[in-house]
Amino acid sequence: MKILVTGGAGYIASHTNLELLNAGYDVVIVDNLSNSSMESVKRVEKLTGRKIAFYEVDILDKESLRQIFEKEKIDSVIHFAGLKAVGESCLKPLNYFRNNLSGTIVLLEVMQEFAVKSLVFSSSATVYGDPAKVPVTEDMPLSVTNPYGRTKLMIEDILQDLYRSDATWNIAILRYFNPIGAHESGEIGEDPSGIPNNLVPYVAKVAIGELEKINVNGDDYDTPDGTGIRDYIHVVDLALGHIKAIEKLTDHPGLVIYNLGTGIGYSVFDIIHNYEKACNKKLPYTVVARRPGDIAVSYADASKAYQELGWKAERGIDKMCEDSYRWQSKYPKGYSK
Ligand code: NAD
Ligand code: UFG
């Protein structure tokens, strides 16, 4: 079975590709390399001993996408391609609407044209806004606070409308909580450009001495230690969730939505302390102001994915931090030489 992976050179996709190839799927990547490098693709090929068909193409380029569908005989699509920085999306909302929304529409049009109607979409826990209760279930009300989140919610709505118009589509919307960590080989991992926005990539750079200290964004939230609580999930567990979703789509389920999280919330201080264990050193931090738009607590009820996909996250916070540190210390500069 041949899977087209959009954004396939990126962080979550590279781990997913590795699991797809190990499970016997063929992988075709479309990526414009706007936030990634070919090196991740080469490493996945090396780790698996399998070849990947790679196209450096923007998903907005309809004619090139058509040619790929013509040539490759795609069975199913996993759609990761998108811009994902919340802060940047507030400064450049049109870039986000054009890239994420228009890109998805072009992809769906080409899929429809070639009668490929099986899609896994990367959504996000951000669509729950500031959840009224935790753990968060899939049927809770949705709302967003920034343009990035709005693109995810709008795409979810587009997919619902598409399915209502034609029930021969099979669509899995996966709402990821906070993916962290790396493959245990240390050969692939997250490689953010510039100073990381997200907590764990930032902590990783403090651990290798590239950044001086962690900025804890507020210790006055209504949580046990005052810092924000999130549901961190090992990227390999997340990747395996995509394999289960692809399997589900072959049963023709219609449109399905799953939270992919562990169901456990950890605070910023929990993360720092677990990372200290992984790297075996004290990590300096300072408490700074809250980050605008942040919420106090979010973690998943992931029982629907367990009941319907037979999937649950297996890797704990210690493994997430150990694998993150292995990748970061083996490749302090990420994929660049
Ligand atoms: P990433 O930036 O590493 O991967 C995205 C990939 O898409 C990159 O390789 C980039 O070059 C590519 N891309 C972007 N626009 C493109 C376009 N127009 N045409 C072709 N390729 C394009 O990000 P990631 O963390 O691996 O995230 C993957 C997906 O999961 C994204 O859709 C993201 O919004 C979503 N998601 C991520 C998180 C997270 O915390 N990392 C959480 C929830 C959801
Ligand atoms: N934090 C710090 N210091 C930092 C960075 C973050 O204290 O330098 C805190 C935040 O305030 C928050 C927690 O660490 O309490 C996690 O922050 P992240 O930036 O790592 O993650 P978010 O939950 O804010 O957002 C991430 C992605 C979103 C996605 C969301 C849910 O950035 O795109 O997870 O999947 F929508």
Image (cartoon, helix red, strand yellow):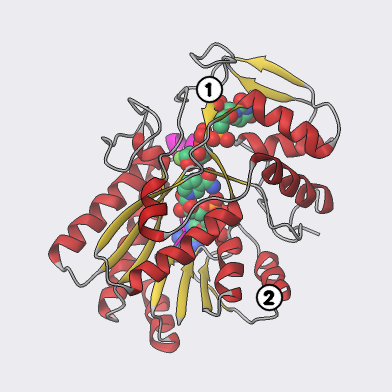
Q: Amino acid at mark 2?
A: Thr
* Residue 86 on the magenta span: yes
Q: Which residue is at a point 29% across and 51% down the rendered structure image?
A: 156
Disc 1 packing (10 Å; few <14; some 14–19; many ≥20) = few
* Rendering quarter of residue 184: bottom right
Mark 2 secondary-structure assignment: helix
- Asked if residue 263 lies left or right of residue 97, the reply is right
Per the rendered image, the range of residues in magenta is 79-91
Residue denoted by label 2: 48
- Which x, y percent locates residue 312? 49, 52
- Asked if residue 164 lies left or right of residue 232, the reply is left
- In this view, which residue lies farthest toward the top? 220
- Asked if residue 201 lies left or right of residue 247, the reply is right
In the rendered image, the quadrant that contains the C terminus is bottom right
Ligand 2 within 8 Å, label 1 CB:
yes
- Which x, y percent locates residue 175? 40, 48
Mark 1 secondary-structure assignment: loop
- Which x, y percent locates residue 170? 28, 68
